Image (cartoon, rainbow, N blue to C red):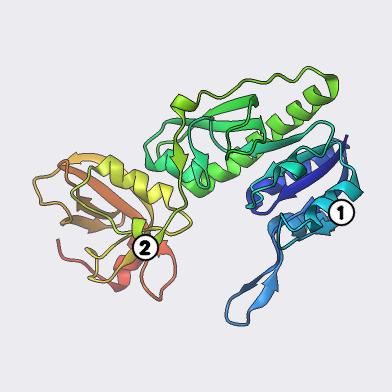
Amino acid sequence: MRILFMGTPEFAVASLKRLVEDGHEICGVFTQPDKPKNRGHKLVFSPVKEYALTQNLTVYQPLKMRDGEALGIVKALGPELIVVAAYGRILPEEILDAPEYGSINVHSSLLPKYRGAAPINWAILDGETETGVSIMYMAKELDAGDVILQRRTAIGPEENAQELTRRLAELGAEALSETVTALAGGTAVRTPQDGSRQSYASMLTKEMSPIDWTRSAHEISCQVRGLIPWPCASTDVISGDAIKLYAAAETGENTNALPGVIVAAGKQGIDIACGDGKVLRVKELQAQGGKRMTAAAYLLGHPIRC
């Protein structure tokens, strides 16, 4: 099938790669404009652009989607299908409706739950034990189109958002491959979403970082896992300054210590009392101006009295 692909981050690369491996004709790739990075402000390609160039695919990076330029490119390319995976732009209806088979999206949740920008993070933040991917027709309303196919997967008890993103990227690629085959064969189904069951996964903010130790150990564990790699959960109870937490685990142990009190510190990590009387063990962290390291390595230079 002749496909126009639209995507930007690493999550989208798996889907584009699968379409290439399946032998589809990728007539073009839309991705976000190059962005300056670090102090030198050197322009950096998106992961999708990097992969597309290795496959000699033509890359387009329109600044706007509603000024007619993007629509002109789409019409000139003449795709039979548009596939979108984490592109990061809202597409006007005239673009969505241009291809013969329409436009479909690879979305990292079990719709209608977690429509929006950060479905993987919010599934973990909310303590979900299961998530998945949905392949859906794109519609004017955000993530509200009819679902073609879904695939489910369990969320590991210590799995963070970055790890889950990698797994869902591969799961989404597999589901996309099945969907395109069904579309070409005329066997794809359309299942309308139940709007009464929808929930919204808003963008993450730095204000979500500080840990409230009066919450339960499980809730804080979900916060730590759900905010990786950005903005990361943070706490000042270890050193007095905000320290980012990259890994933490529920020990199952009980404590009478007040929430936020360090009850143990050693090779296994830094144990902190939570609001439900349980203990959360910090296993990996990053102090301000420092490198990401294990809690044990941090303690070698920053001993803590409990």
Residue 92 shown left or right of residue 196 in the figure: right
Q: Is residue 89 above or below residue 122?
A: below
N-terminal of the two: label 2 or label 1? 1
Q: Secondary structure at mark 2?
A: strand
Quarter of the image for residue 177 reads: top right
The C terminus, quarter of image: bottom left
Instruction: Find residue 294 and name its label.
Output: none
Residue for point 59% across, 44% down: 166
Q: Amino acid at mark 2?
A: Lys
Of residues 68 and 160, which is closer to you in this image? 68
- Residue 82: x percent and y percent? 78, 40
The answer to the question of whether label 2 and label 1 lie on touching residues, with beta carbons closer than 8 A, is no
Q: Which residue is mark 1?
A: 57
Residue 282 shown left or right of residue 21 in the figure: left
Q: Which residue is mark 2?
A: 244
Residue 20 in sight in this render? no
Classify mark 1: residues with Cα within 10 Å, few (<14), some (14-19) or many (20+).
some
Quarter of the image for residue 267 reads: bottom left
Of residues 156 and 228, which is closer to you in this image? 228
Classify mark 2: residues with Cα within 10 Å, few (<14), some (14-19) or many (20+).
many
Residue 280 shown left or right of residue 133 in the figure: left
The N terminus, quarter of image: top right
Quarter of the image for residue 304 reads: bottom left
Q: Is residue 120 above or below residue 265?
A: above
- Residue 42: x percent and y percent? 67, 77
Q: Nearer the viewer, mark 2 or mark 1?
A: 1
